[in-house]
Image: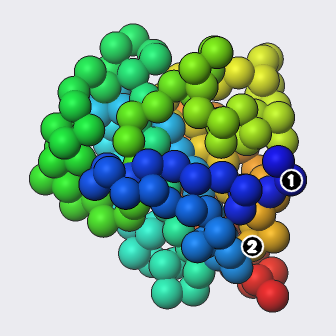
Amino acid sequence: MSSIYDFTAERMDGTQQDFTDYQGKVLLIVNTASKCGFTPQFAGLETLYQQYKDRGLMVIGFPCNQFGNQDPGSNEEIGNFCQKNYGVSFPMMTKVDVNGKDAHPIFDWLKEQKGGVLTDGIKWNFTKFLVGDDGHVLERYAPTTKPESMASDIERALLAIK
C-alpha cells in the first residue's frame, strides 16, 4: 500500500468508505474510545472539524476497545454516545483493532509510516495521525496531545493542498 487512498473501512452505518473519496483533503485519523480519560477530546476534534472542514480537513474516528476495555459498546451505542455527548458530525467508522494480528490494515500502514516514541504500536486511545493531501502521513500525535494544539500543523497542511 502506497498511500491512505489504497484503503477502505466500514462506516458506522454499515456502508464501505473508499478512502479515494478523500483525495485532495487533509485527514486527521484518530482511534477513539467512549469511556476513556481522553474521551473529552471528541469536543476538540469536532471543533477542529467545524473550523477547517470547508478548507479541506476531514476528521475520521475509529473506535477501539483494545485499551482498558474503554469502548465495549456496539457500533450503534458508540455512534449515539459521540453524537449526543459531543455533537460529533465527522465520520466515525466501525470499531476496529489497531494493534495485533486483527488490526485494521489502515492502522498497520499508519504505524509503518510514523512509528511511535517507544514503540511503533499504538499505546492508547486517541493516538492521532495527520495525513496530507498527497495521502501520506505528516505527523503522529500522542493520546495526551490536545486537538487544539494541532491547529498550526493542520493549517500548514491545508495551505499545502494542491
Question: Is residue 25 in view?
Answer: yes
Rendered residue at 73%/56% (across/down): 6
* Residue behind mark 1: 2
Left-right relation of 65 to 99 = left
Rendered residue at 76%/83% (across/down): 161
Give the percent coordinates (x, y) of residue 155: 67, 75
Query: Which residue extends farthest top?
Result: 68
Rendered residue at 60%/44% (across/down): 128
Q: Which mark is residue 119?
A: none
* Residue behind mark 2: 133
Left-right relation of 154 to 93 = right
Question: Is residue 86 in view?
Answer: no
Left-right relation of 123 to 115 = left
Relative to 25, say whether 99 is above or below.
above
- Amino acid type at circle 1 is Ser
Q: Callout 2: helix, strand or loop?
A: loop
Which residue is at the front of the view, 147 or 128?
A: 128
